[in-house]
Amino acid sequence: MSNKRPESRRNWVDNAFRGVRSQPESRELFDEFLSGIEYSQNTTRAIASDLHQFMIWFVDRNGEDFTVSRVTMRDVIDYKNYRRTEMGMSIATVNRSIVLLRRFFGWLVEHNKLSTNPAKSVREFRSVELAPKGLDRQSVRKLLRELSVCGDVRANAIFHMLLYTGCRVADLRLELSDLNITQRSGTVVFRHGKGGKQRIVPLPLPARTAIHEWLEVRPPVRTSSVFVGTRGPLTERGVRAICNKYSAVIGIRIHPHLCRHTFSHRYLEDNGNDLVGLAAILGHENLNTTCRYTKRTQESLAANSENITY
């Protein structure tokens, strides 16, 4: 195995094993696992975080160093129940951690590092799948109105891009050449989609107007990035900081993916449930992924229940 590792992967490995008593072999196997996959940074971060939490629990509950060959199905089941019952974590969060553990141990079996996958037969918790929650129209109006009152042209352009294209936060790493805007139409090329996929998405008039206003006052910096700050291209952390800022201002928690969910709900509502069109805009290869937006939200179920009379 090569001792040379990309800085980013070394960080994920270091974070996963931070403060964990473990056998050196386990660390090397996780490093090798990460070197053979091509997940997004967010997915890699989630894998490292979930493995870290599992190892901390394993060492505490079993009183021994973490070793991949010592993990049993009983450990995975107990860990699943611990996170749900004792920690009170959501079903979705617990299920995600089990899926990621199954993926890691499955890789070890596939590459002859283990004989069996201890997470293979551990079932996730079952739940009624609801549509991802988005902002209602009043909340969106409140946000956009506050951006206008504050005169924050850059944030206004960012939120219009999120709310009118349904892009992910990683998609905002745009170059000026990715924009094609005219008086009557416009498109944007998202080059940093999941799995390295690229897609071209239309820019509605409100988004074109907001982007144009930002480009008019964009600082004359050397970088060709669309969104820039005082230190260069705006990072994902910078975008999240902007979301946190306006969450505090309007009293509604906002994050980039919430805007993506909001766009998806509005698109289906206003376009006769055009799932194929929405899938193309969001970059979904499988329509089943897009179909979740046709499910009921918790709020709509509650509202419908209020209408029951006897």
Image: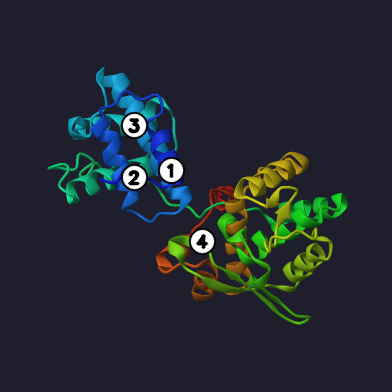
Q: Which amino acid type corresponds to the residue marked 1 in the rendered image?
A: Ala
Residue assigned mark 3: 54
Q: Tags 2 and 1 in contact by the CB under 8 Å rule? A: yes
Q: Position of residue 104 (x, y in %)?
A: 28, 44
Q: Give the crowd class for mark 3: few <14, some 14-19, many >=20 residues within 10 Å.
A: many
Element under disc 1: helix
Q: Give the crowd class for mark 4: few <14, some 14-19, many >=20 residues within 10 Å.
A: many
Q: Earlier in the sequence, mark 4 or mark 2?
A: 2
Residue assigned mark 4: 293
Residue assigned mark 1: 46
Q: Between marks 3 and 1, how big is the CA–CA gap?
A: 12 Å
Residue assigned mark 2: 100
Q: Earlier in the sequence, mark 2 or mark 1?
A: 1
Q: Between marks 4 and 2, how big is the CA–CA gap?
A: 24 Å
Element under disc 2: helix
| Point 87% across, 51% down: residue | 149
Picture quarter containing residue 31?
top left
